[in-house]
Image: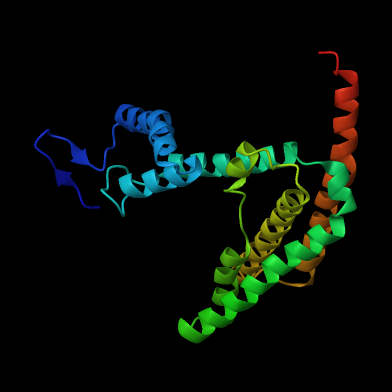
Amino acid sequence: MLYLQLGLNVDLPITNTTWIFFLVLIIILFAPILLDRLRIPHIIGMILAGVVIGEYGFNILERDSSFELFGKVGLYYIMFLGGLEMDMEDFKTNRMKTVVFGLLTFCIPMVLGVWSSQTFLDYNLETSILLASMYASHTLIAYPIVSRYGLSRLRSVSISVGATAITVTLALLILAIISGMYRDEVDQWFWIFMIIKVAIVIFIIVYTFPRVARWFFRKYEDN
């Protein structure tokens, strides 16, 4: 790790938790004000701010476990907002379109990623598949912009949100399979247990969650 000594006796990257919190808070508070004047979407500006202060920019802050946690929580929160604002009736009507779109947005980058990794990077098949799964999965990072303009209930947005869930699920399945192959755990029981686990998760999401949610809101709608 490279540390730069400044005239103010400040070592970079900053490791003091108080200064880290202060700097992040300043960026969160004042970056949107500046970005509004420049007509740049907030989410893009926050990404650029992270690049500037990160280890590949001015090396003011280093990436550690806390920032990884915040990043994951932020992505989960965006996906939560996407699900919260979805029109479920429209989603049910277009579920086949969602599935087809999700499979296409996963399979096309997956195939291209495997081919390019083997052709240009000379990776083996397992490594190529794992790397391609990163290309194939995507997040709803642009969703706050769509939501701000009141477009979150459009059919195309609902299909995209559902497709995102499909691509992320498939990417996680590939990660689990590659991890099992790396640990030499892939046998017939591995596939049996994986199928059972996937079936249980699908059952909980499709059957249990909607019924629990309807019961909860019927019982506590007055509160």
185 shown above or below 203: below
Is 51 placed left or right of 106 in the picture?
left
Where residue 199 sits: x, y (%)?
A: 85, 56
Instruction: Count numbered badges in the picture.
Output: 0
Residue 194 can be seen, yes or no: yes
- 86 to 55, vertically: above or below: above
Q: Decide which of 214, 14 is in the foreground and name it.
A: 214
Vertical comparison of 151 with 28: above or below = below
Identify the residue at horizontal 19%, vertical 47% (top origin): 3
Counting from the top left corner in percent of width and height, residue 178 is at 62, 69
* 120 horizontally vs 208: left or right: left
- Which color scheme is applied? rainbow
Whether residue 193 is visible to the viewer of this picture, yes or no, is no
Q: Quadrant of the C terminus?
A: top right
Decide if residue 221 is on the left or right side of residue 134: right
Q: Residue sitting at 77 percent across and 41 percent down? A: 86
- Depth check: give the residue in front, 158 or 77: 158
Residue 1 in the image: state x and y as whole percent. Answer: 25, 52
Residue 216, image x, y percentages:
86, 25
Report the residue that reaches farthest toward the top. Answer: 223
User: In which quarter of the view is residue 21 placed?
Assistant: top left
Residue at the left extreme, as displayed = 7
> Which residue is drawn at the image coordinates 64% and 39% (left, top)?
147
User: Which image quadrant is residue 104 in?
Assistant: bottom right
Q: In this view, does 24 lie to the left or right of 15?
A: right
Q: Nearer the viewer, residue 57 or 89?
A: 89
Q: Residue 14 sits in which quadrant?
A: top left
